[in-house]
Image (spheres, coloured by chain):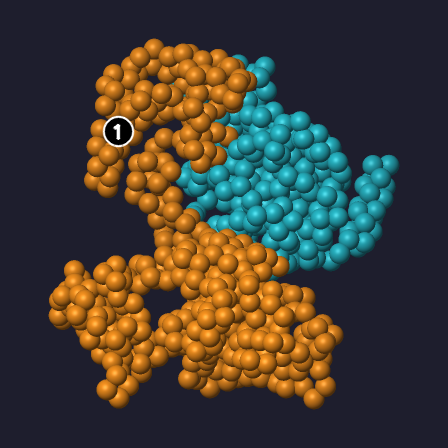
Amino acid sequence: MIERIRRADGTGELSPERPLVVVEKSGSKRWLAAVDAKARSAGLHVGMPAAKAQAIVQGLQVVEADPIADVAALERLTLWALTQYSPIVAMDAPDGIVMDTEGADHLQGGEELMLSGIVNRFRARGLTARVAIADSWGAAHALARASGRETVVAPCGETSRFVEKLPLSSLRLSPETVISLRTLGFRTIGELAATPRAPLALRFGPEIGRRLDQMYGRLPEPIDPIRPMDVVEVSRAFAEPIGAPETIAKYVSRLVGELCDALEKKALGVRRSDLIVHKVDNTMQAIRAGTAKPARDVAWLTKLFKDRIEKIEPGFGIEKLSLVAVIAEPLTETQKTSSLIEEEVVDITPLIDVIGNRGQRVYRVAPVASDVPERSVTRIAAAAEEVGASWTLHWPRPVRLLARPDPIEVIALLPDHPPVSITWRGKRRRVKRADGPERIFGEWWTRSSEFDAVRDYFVIEDDAGERFWIFRSGDGLDTATGSQKWFLHGIFA
Amino acid sequence: MTAAREWVISHLRERIASLESATVRKRGCLAFGVAEIDAALPGGGLAYGALHEFAGGGSGTVDGAAAALCVAGIAARTKGQILWCMTRPDLFFPALAQAGLNPDRVVFAEADREEDVLATMEEGLSFGGLGAVVGEVVRLPMTASRRLQLVAEKTGTMGLVVRRWRRQTEASDFGQPTASTTRWRVSVLPSEELPVPGVGRPRWLLELMRVKAGECAEFIVGACDATGRIHLFPGSRDREDQTRRWDGRTVA
């Protein structure tokens, strides 16, 4: 909330040096609804009366709370998360977003990488995010808010170990209940979970038991996913639950057909679509498929989903299937040139999508204007436009380039003679022929640390005809240009 | 007598061809452009719609550099996009560009597991319309190679496998039978001698270890030039001078 206000403050009225609080009011009562880090260190906390806070801290900046704008901002964030991370995303009001990432994390490189990615993307926009992943909504909610770390991953089945030390306030109970429980001497969730239920239920009602069961995953807590207003969605409910893979496949292809019709009316093509499976036991499963270009081709989209129908666990049966076009982009029909005039170019985007949706890295490479070998190649999207450029080189380059140059031991005459022999990975090789040096200077215009750096590259060939690319770090005379050590960087064919 | 024999042979050829699937015959071949090598291959070149295996020799079994460059040269001479599947992304593309392969033509698919590479290759071969599908794999079991070969026959896309092992001792695996149409070993040889100090044109020992309906052969060739073509070197016994050696041997 604080950060939304700071970001919205374009005019610079609020100073970053002075503590900032947000004040909420009800009737004549005014209290702090949010405090920033500076205010917190000055001793202010959420729930404190506003007058008291102003008395404690001099020069306190006070902003009136605007709950409607907060909800709107959270909704925007949630919709963004829907397009980025997972098909099942909902607001966890007032300050969180909950996502079901099962089956979606591999697209981000795994759970750990996904979480740190989320934190970094928020930080890049000046927001602080706390992210946790756990077996249940309740556990993730508590871990994100109470663990004190930026990212937490609770592995499957270890929820109880992670949550037992957390305070009661993270259990999503009403504040009055939490205060009463504290009065009774309960401090942590573990203590509360170890207490017999009956007396608690008698005194506080069923709420505590329900929240505990939800946290430990004993009670399902389905996420009601958020949907943008103008999303294209088709769904089909079944009178009798279905479960056989052939039946699922049949209905998936029908849904894809309907979706494509709906998209055609709006002249849209889908970039990311989700198949959401509603099961009889009130749980959901989602399959997400992305395409590299806007697509409206029934066969292409059906293939993307059919590839992964085996991932669907029907359980007791599926009662509803819905297909949502989460990201849709304009797509207009283009006229194809006849194969009589020019040769037909095969569009391989469907193939790229099939491979990409299996979690493999699909890319092309493009040249970069850099003399440093490891920087002269960059990866670009597989479906990107043709670059048309290639490397302009006069010297041979090795087929395999080691990710990290391997140190070698060398007998060589300084400064510019090629080595007489090298020892690489414990094997000594006599150098029979050599070419070089090819001097490569550090790119001082991008990194000042490379101002003097020099590498002298040699192509060498040993007795057996194996050819290697080796370099000396430095020019062989001046220690400022490098360590004068030798490295093997590549292997020629 | 000879006429009768030729008639019998051609009759037999026709009968065998009718047993093979109809698609195989009309796909054609990609000639190396070197008469001696093409003569060793039935159809006069590397068949489209078939699987071809390439491995390195010596320490090339681990780095697979020569095999990869040889495959890149072949891929450069096909038409259409290339799908290159691997698990170890240590290919340095400028070298392949020097063998005539345009970076815009190659789509890389990097998988974490060997099986995924094979699955991706199969997907690429069955897609149709690609110039070639290249895969760098350690193990190529019989079943997997047969699947790849069949799917390649169906679409007419050329499948190229670069065998690359983790250790040199594991390379004995290359003796195991697979369903690929040809099997090659590319080993590096000392480069061509120059009258001045320096590394000359790289040379390879290209061994055709297995070919369906053909005989094994070996050649000493000069590595891929800027258009991906290889050149035949005369045997090491031949000691002609530099300029004469190139005359007439260069096949464009």
The colour chain A appears in is orange
Q: Nearer the viewer, residue A353 or A321?
A: A321
Q: Where does the image place residue B150, in percent across and percent down from the top left? A: 71, 53
**Left or right, residue B79 beside residue A45:** right
Query: Is B189 located above or below residue A94 in the figure?
Result: above
Q: Chain of mark 1?
A: A
* Residue B120 visible from this viewpoint: yes
Query: Is A21 located above or below residue A240 in the figure?
Result: above
Residue at 63% from the left image edge and 79% from the top image edge:
A282
Quadrant position of residue B21: bottom right
Name, please, the residue furthest toward the front: A184
- Total marks in image: 1
* Residue B192 visible from this viewpoint: no
Q: Where does the image place residue A135, in percent across and percent down from the top left? A: 57, 64
Residue at 44% from the left image edge and 51% from the top image edge:
A364
Q: Nearer the viewer, residue B176 or B183?
A: B176
Residue at 50% from the left image edge and 85% from the top image edge:
A262
Quadrant position of residue A218: bottom right
Residue with the mark numbered 1: A453
Q: Nearer the viewer, residue A230 or A489?
A: A230
- Residue type, numbered disc 1: Ala
Query: Is A274 located above or below residue B127 in the figure?
Result: below
Quadrant position of residue A318: bottom right
Q: Where does the image place residue A97, in percent across and percent down from the top left? A: 43, 71
Q: Where does the image place residue A280, in percent across and percent down from the top left? A: 67, 80
Q: Quadrant of the N terminus of chain A?
A: bottom left
> Dot 1, how many residues are within 10 Å of its Cα: few (below 14), some (14-19), or many (20+)?
many
Q: Nearer the viewer, residue A241 or B191?
A: A241
The colour chain B appears in is cyan
Q: Circle 1 sits in a helix, a strand or a loop, which is it?
A: loop
Residue at 48% from the left image edge and 64% from the top image edge:
A187
